[in-house]
C-alpha cells in the first residue's frame, strides 16, 4: 500500500516523486500504522520493488493479504496524480470503515462520490460482486479500471475478454453505451473498448481508442461524446466465413442439440449469426442461438404459420432454464435485455425479406422465400450486410 497513518493519526503517502533519502529520513524518525487495522507497518524503500508500506508477515489484517505488483502500485500512483491535477480533492487508498473496504482512489463528487479500483490481477467473481455491491449500498459509484496488461488483442479489432473483463464492463451515463476502461502505467496511456459485439462467449469485435495522460477531464474518459450508431462491423463477413467452416462441430450440449434441430444441415445459413445492439446480453454465440431460432421456427417453410415474438422468447427462455443457452450475468447488463436481442434479430429477418409482419409482434414466412441456398451464400451475406446498414 502507498498510504499509512502517523502516530498523530494523519495520513502519510508515498505518492510524491521525491528522492529516496527524503523518505529514508522520515522512516528513521517515525512509526507508521495501517489505516484499516492500526497494526504497525514498515516503509519499504528497496531497489527492486516500488516503494510501499507493508505489514509484518504474521499480520492479521485482511488488507495485507492483497499482494500488489510494481505495475499495480505504479498505476495507482499515476492515476492518483492524474486525478489530483484535474479533480481535487482525491484520496489515495482511503479506508471506508462503514463497509471495511479500501478502494484505490476516492473522488468526492456530488451527488455521489466515485470510488476507483485499478485491477491488474484476476479476482473471483464473488469478490468482484461483493466489492461492487458494498460500494453501491454505501452510495458510492464504483468504477473499475483494468490494467493495460489485461487487454488481450488478437487482431486489429478482435479482443479476448475474460470473466473479469465482462464484469468490469460499464454503461456510460449519456449514451448508455457499454465500454471497458484500461490503463497502462508503463505507457502512461488510457484505453477504452466500445461498441463491443461478441461472436463467441469470450471473443468480441470492438472499437479501441487510446488516450494519453493529457486527457482533459474525467468526464471525457467516463462519459465520452456520443459515438456512431450501432452498425454491423465490416469485418463481420470474415468472421461469418470462418464460422461457416466448422458450424455445429463443437463438442458442447448446445451444438449437439442444434445438430438435431438442424436435421443434419452442415452449414450456418446466410441469415444466421448477425450482431444486434442487445446481443451482448447473451453469452451463447449468436451463431448458435440464432441458428436455433432459424431452424426451429422457419425451416418448415410454412407461410401460413404465424410466429409470435412472445412464443419465440418463451422457447428461448426454456432452453436457458435447461442450461443449453447462457445469458451474461454482469452488473452493466440487465437479464431482460436478451428479449431485446431476440426481437432485434427478428427485425433482421424482416429486413432480409424472410419474415413479414402480420400484426403486433407477429410474423409469418414470406412467400417464395428460399431459406437454404448454399451455392450463393457469400453473395447473400453481402446483400444482408448491406440491408442491415442503418437498421439500428
Image (cartoon, rainbow, N blue to C red):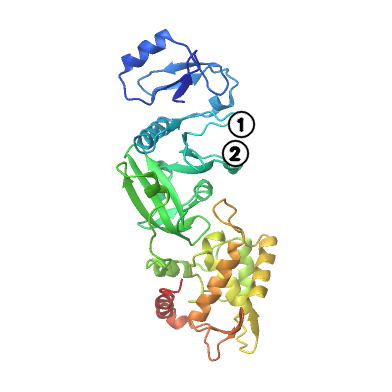
Q: State the image coordinates of residue 300 (x, y, percent, origin top left).
A: 62, 84
Number of marks: 2
Q: State the image coordinates of residue 369 (x, y, percent, origin top left).
A: 53, 88
Query: Which residue in the rendered view is the most extreme toward the bottom?
Result: 368
Residues tagged 1 and 2 counted as in contact (Cβ below 8 A): yes
Distance from disc 1 to disc 2, alpha carbons, whole Å, reads 8 Å
Residue in the image at 64% along x and 89% along y: 304
Q: State the image coordinates of residue 299 (x, y, percent, origin top left).
A: 60, 81
Q: State the image coordinates of residue 202 (x, y, percent, origin top left).
A: 50, 55
- Label 2 sits on a secondary structure element that is loop
Mark 1 packing: few (<14 Cα in 10 Å), some, or many (20+)? few
Q: Is residue 372 above or below residue 266?
A: below
Give the residue at mark 2: 138
- Label 1 sits on a secondary structure element that is loop
Q: Is residue 35 above or below residue 147?
A: above
Residue in the image at 40% along x and 8% along y: 28
Quarter of the rendering containing residue 306: bottom right
Give the residue at mark 1: 98
Q: Is residue 225 above or below residue 1?
A: below
Q: Is residue 238 above or below residue 186?
A: below
Quarter of the rendering containing residue 313: bottom right
Residue in the image at 57% along x and 39% along y: 135
Camera-side residue of 202 and 43: 43
Camera-side residue of 176 and 233: 176
Looking at marks 1 and 2 on the same chain, the residue that comes earlier in the sequence is marked by 1
Amino acid at each position: 500500500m502507498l498510504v499509512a497513518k502517523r502516530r498523530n493519526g494523519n495520513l502519510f503517502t508515498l505518492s510524491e516523486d521525491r528522492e529516496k533519502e527524503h523518505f529514508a529520513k522520515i522512516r528513521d524518525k517515525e512509526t507508521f500504522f495501517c489505516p484499516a487495522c492500526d497494526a504497525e507497518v514498515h516503509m519499504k524503500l528497496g531497489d527492486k520493488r516500488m516503494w510501499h508500506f507493508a505489514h509484518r508477515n504474521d499480520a492479521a489484517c485482511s488488507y495485507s493479504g492483497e499482494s500488489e505488483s510494481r505495475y499495480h502500485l505504479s498505476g495507482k500512483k499515476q492515476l492518483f496524480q492524474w486525478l489530483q491535477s484535474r479533480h481535487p480533492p482525491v484520496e489515495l487508498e482511503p479506508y471506508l470503515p462503514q463497509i471495511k473496504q479500501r478502494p484505490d482512489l476516492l473522488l468526492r463528487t456530488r451527488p455521489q462520490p466515485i470510488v476507483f479500483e485499478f485491477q491488474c490481477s484476476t479476482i473471483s467473481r464473488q469478490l468482484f460482486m461483493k466489492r461492487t455491491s458494498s460500494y453501491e449500498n454505501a452510495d458510492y459509484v464504483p468504477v473499475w479500471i483494468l490494467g493495460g496488461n489485461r487487454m488481450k488483442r488478437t487482431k486489429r479489432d478482435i479482443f479476448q475478454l475474460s470473466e473479469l473483463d465482462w464484469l468490469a464492463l460499464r454503461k456510460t451515463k449519456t449514451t448508455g453505451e457499454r465500454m471497458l476502461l484500461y490503463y497502462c502505467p508503463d505507457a502512461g496511456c488510457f484505453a477504452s473498448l466500445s461498441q463491443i459485439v461478441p461472436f463467441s462467449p469470450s471473443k468480441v469485435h470492438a472499437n479501441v481508442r487510446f488516450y494519453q495522460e493529457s486527457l482533459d477531464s474525467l468526464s471525457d474518459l467516463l462519459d465520452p461524446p456520443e459515438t456512431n450508431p450501432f452498425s454491423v462491423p465490416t469485418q463481420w463477413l470474415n468472421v461469418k466465413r470462418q464460422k461457416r467452416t466448422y458450424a455445429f462441430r463443437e463438442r458442447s450440449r448446445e451444438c449437439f442439440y442444434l445438430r438435431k434441430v438442424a436435421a443434419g444441415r452442415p452449414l450456418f445459413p446466410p441469415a444466421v449469426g448477425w450482431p444486434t445492439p442487445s446481443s451482448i446480453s447473451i453469452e451463447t454465440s449468436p451463431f448458435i442461438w440464432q441458428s436455433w431460432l432459424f431452424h426451429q421456427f422457419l425451416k418448415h417453410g410454412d407461410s401460413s404459420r404465424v410466429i409470435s415474438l412472445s412464443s419465440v422468447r418463451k422457447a428461448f427462455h426454456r432452453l436457458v432454464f435447461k442450461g443449453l443457452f447462457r445469458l451474461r450475468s454482469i452488473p452493466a447488463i440487465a437479464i431482460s435485455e436478451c428479449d431485446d436481442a431476440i426481437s432485434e434479430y427478428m427485425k433482421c429477418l424482416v429486413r432480409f425479406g424472410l419474415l413479414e409482419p402480420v400484426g403486433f409482434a407477429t410474423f409469418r414466412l414470406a412467400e417464395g422465400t428460399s431459406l437454404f441456398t448454399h451455392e450463393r451464400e457469400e453473395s447473400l451475406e453481402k446483400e444482408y450486410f448491406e440491408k442491415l446498414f442503418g437498421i439500428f
